[in-house]
Image (tube, helix red, strand yellow):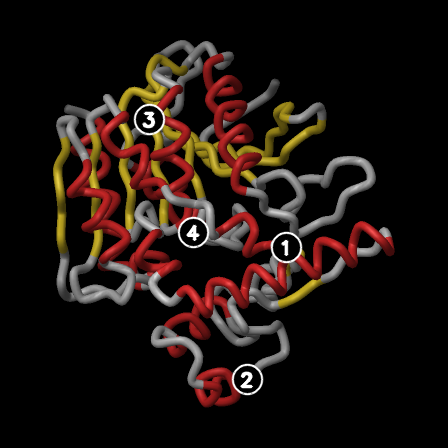
């Protein structure tokens, strides 16, 4: 494999197919030296050019090898034969992550592997690390590790989501055709005003400014991204309950979040259950999505992660 400083497009095997990733290397990269590495896990329903495309160069700038990749069926990575694109299944995300760790372990210039997850990626990294001790430390930013109260507090709504997902699953089985929906309500066609006026998302403005048609990392800015997803998503996301594994994590852990964010409970309830060595960086002045792309928030987060992984 020919690689150089900066961004390198790579592939690695998972579920028998080639997942596509970007491997970010430090500016002064020397293949004869040893580097600490990071496997990145992205928010739902992102591809590698979004948050990971922001954090990758920042962590490489701080001396790390960083791997951001498209999960099975997402972005530039294929779906399995007979399956559909935009099928981000939780348990497969964990296995894809284990395979990403295995890939990093084959690189002769990698001496240590850490995990960094943002939003849903926090749950992925935390869960993957429970039984993968090749991952030496983990860090989560705006992490959605504790989903019980966040997703199940209104059982009626949860059951409505399940019913819709069940119907979509049955439809796809019977027709053999993909059934695409907008699980976050936001479509690729919404204007900002249309989406905010729906009143269905307390984070509507910042969500649109990132994911929307005119957003900084929406489908126009990132052509291999779409807000549409396979309709069975609720059957996957509603069992993304990482807090139930929190007391099993042995790796040193860093949690970065905003107490002012609507999603703060997804970090705080996870923190309450940790029994390992851990550190908390609570930054009131930022929102959940600020950590995705706002320069000041990203800089604070990546500086803290680099310091933590270098201890």
Q: Which mark is residue 232?
A: 1
Report the quarter where the N terminus lies: top right
Q: Image check: 250 left or right of 31?
A: left
Disc 1 crowd, CA 10 A, few/some/many (<14, 14-19, 20+): many
Please tell me which residue is depicted at 36% across the width and 26% down the height of the picture: 129
In the rendering, at what x and y percent does residue 219 appear? Answer: 60, 65
Give the percent coordinates (x, y) of residue 39.
42, 31
Residue situated in front as seen by the camera: 238 or 19? 238
Displayed quadrant of residue 96: top right
Asked if disc 1 and disc 4 are in contact, CB closer than 8 Å, the reply is no
Mark 1 → mark 4, Cα distance in angstroms: 24 Å
Give how far apart the Cα atoms at labels 4 and 3 are.
17 Å
**Label 4 residue SS:** helix
Quadrant for the C terminus, please.
top left
Residue underneath mark 3: 114
Q: Is residue 44 above or below residue 24?
A: below
Residue found 24% across the figure and 65% down from its top: 261
The answer to which image quadrant residue 136 occupies is top left
- Work out whether mark 1 precedes mark 4 in sequence or the reverse, and give the earlier one: 4
Residue, disc 4? 51
Name the residue carrying label 2.
Answer: 191
Whether pointer 3 and pointer 1 mark residues with C-beta atoms closer than 8 Å, the reply is no
C-alpha gap between disc 2 and disc 3: 39 Å
Position of residue 44 measured from the top left corner of the image (x, y, whole percent): 49, 53
Spatial distance from mark 2 to mark 1, Cα to Cα?
26 Å
Please state if 280 lies on the left or on the right of 27 as rendered.
Answer: left
Q: Earlier in the sequence, mark 4 or mark 2?
A: 4
Q: Secondary structure at mark 3?
A: strand
Q: Earlier in the sequence, mark 2 or mark 3?
A: 3
């Amino acid at each position: 494999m020919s690689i150089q400083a900066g961004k390198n497009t790579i592939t690695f095997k998972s579920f028998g197919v080639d997942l596509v990733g970007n491997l970010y290397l430090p500016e002064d990269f020397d293949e004869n030296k040893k580097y600490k590495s990071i496997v990145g896990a992205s928010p739902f329903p992102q591809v590698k050019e979004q948050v990971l495309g922001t954090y990758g160069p920042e962590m490489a700038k701080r001396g790390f090898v960083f791997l951001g990749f498209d999960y099975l069926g997402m972005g530039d990575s294929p779906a399995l034969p007979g399956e559909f694109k935009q099928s981000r299944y939780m348990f497969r995300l964990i296995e894809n992550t284990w395979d990403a760790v295995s890939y990093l372990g084959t690189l002769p210039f990698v001496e240590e592997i850490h995990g960094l997850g943002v939003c849903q990626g926090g749950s992925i990294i935390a869960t993957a690390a429970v039984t993968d001790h090749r991952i030496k430390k983990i860090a989560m930013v705006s992490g959605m590790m504790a989903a019980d109260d966040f997703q199940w507090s209104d059982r009626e709504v949860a059951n409505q989501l399940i019913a819709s997902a069940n119907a979509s699953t049955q439809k796809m089985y019977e027709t053999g055709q993909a059934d695409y929906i907008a699980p976050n309500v936001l479509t690729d066609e919404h204007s900002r005003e249309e989406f905010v006026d729906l009143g269905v998302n307390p984070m509507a403005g910042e969500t649109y400014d990132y994911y929307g048609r005119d957003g900084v990392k929406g489908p126009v800015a990132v052509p291999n991204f779409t807000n549409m997803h396979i309709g069975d998503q609720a059957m996957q996301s509603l069992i993304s309950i990482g807090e139930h594994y929190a007391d099993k994590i042995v790796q040193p852990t860093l949690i970065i979040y905003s107490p002012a964010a609507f999603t703060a409970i997804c970090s705080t309830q996870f923190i309450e259950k940790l029994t390992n060595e851990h550190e908390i960086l609570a930054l009131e002045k930022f929102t959940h999505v600020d950590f995705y792309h706002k320069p000041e928030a990203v800089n604070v987060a990546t500086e803290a992660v680099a310091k933590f992984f270098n201890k």
